[in-house]
Image (cartoon, rainbow, N blue to C red):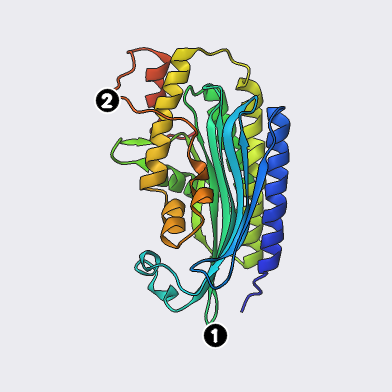
Amino acid sequence: MPTINKEAVKQFLLSLQDSICQQLEAVDGGATFEEDAWHREPGEKLGGGGRTRVMRNGHVFEQGGVNFSHVAGQQMPASATAHRPELAGRRFEAMGVSLVMHPNNPYVPTSHANVRFFIAEKEGEAPIWWFGGGFDLTPFYPFEQDCHEWHRVAKALCAPFGDEVYAEHKAWCDRYFYLPHREETRGIGGLFFDDLNQWSFEQCFDYIKAVGEGYTQAYLPIVERRKVTPYGEREREFQLYRRGRYVEFNLVFDRGTLFGLQSGGRTESILMSMPPLARWEYRYQPQAGSAEAELQQFLVPREW
């Protein structure tokens, strides 16, 4: 039976949250993250705790959050065991870092990243465990250079784990972050994976370390390059309209959001990913040939 070091995973996730917050504060140059530490007693539906950190009204970021959580329960929600019946009757723990950053400037993309660990245990039986995570980019005014560099970092960090990993996890990301009712992807993708346990525990752990640390390597150069781009009311209105798509995905399709709410998780932390402002417009159509119309060309999977 492999050695499962839950404490090592937790300590890495806590340090990752610290590192990402420090780097995002540095690039913002104004606002800092406010921490809201929370705790639930084991007797509650979902025990555990976490550190929710939120940045608001910064020079670069309008709002964003970087969350750490470590929760445990005596049984999985019915929605989970329906798909994974082997989890029935097992106590479980889930821990992870999840973040979403919503910039002020419409030329700076929204970004999301997540790395997580899950384990379900039962006396006398081998534990069921896996890692998951990834990162993806949602530009409103995309630049080819930014898209290529985002995926170049993703491909490079995957390379030590196998020639096929980037292609598999990129394609998984394209499938997962898809809005079927809109027939478009949420953005230009990146990496997404779940149920990762086919390697040794140590190798799987090394991979989420690479993904977690790779997020800022991929994102911050784009932020630095675009954060001073001039914009006006037209671009701001389009940004708010496209943020509506982000809300649609998170509330209708995102498995993490659904699991958190259905299992009795902390609502404020779960919905931290929502933008502070968004809008919807009936039958909106961008002007043909405009920069807004060009976005649609980027909302289909392609090889970068």
Name the residue: 34% across, 68% down.
Answer: 82
Q: Nearer the viewer, residue 224 or 276?
A: 276
Callout 2 secondary element: loop
Q: Nearer the viewer, residue 8 or 91?
A: 91
Checking the image for residue 123, the label placed there is 1
Q: Which residue is mark 2?
A: 282
Rendering coords of residue 232 (x, y %): 50, 12
Q: Does residue 10 lie above or below 251 as drawn?
A: below
Q: Nearer the viewer, residue 34 or 146?
A: 34
Callout 1 secondary element: loop
Crowdedness near tag 1: few (<14), some (14–19) or many (≥20) residues, C-alpha within 10 Å? few
Name the amino acid, label 1: Glu
Name the residue: 52% across, 69% down.
Answer: 44
All told, the count of numbered labels is: 2
Q: Nearer the viewer, residue 165 or 31?
A: 31
Name the amino acid, label 2: Tyr
Q: CA distance from mark 1 to mark 2?
A: 55 Å
* Mark whose residue sits in front, 1 or 2: 2
Rendering coords of residue 275 (x, y %): 49, 35
Crowdedness near tag 2: few (<14), some (14–19) or many (≥20) residues, C-alpha within 10 Å? few
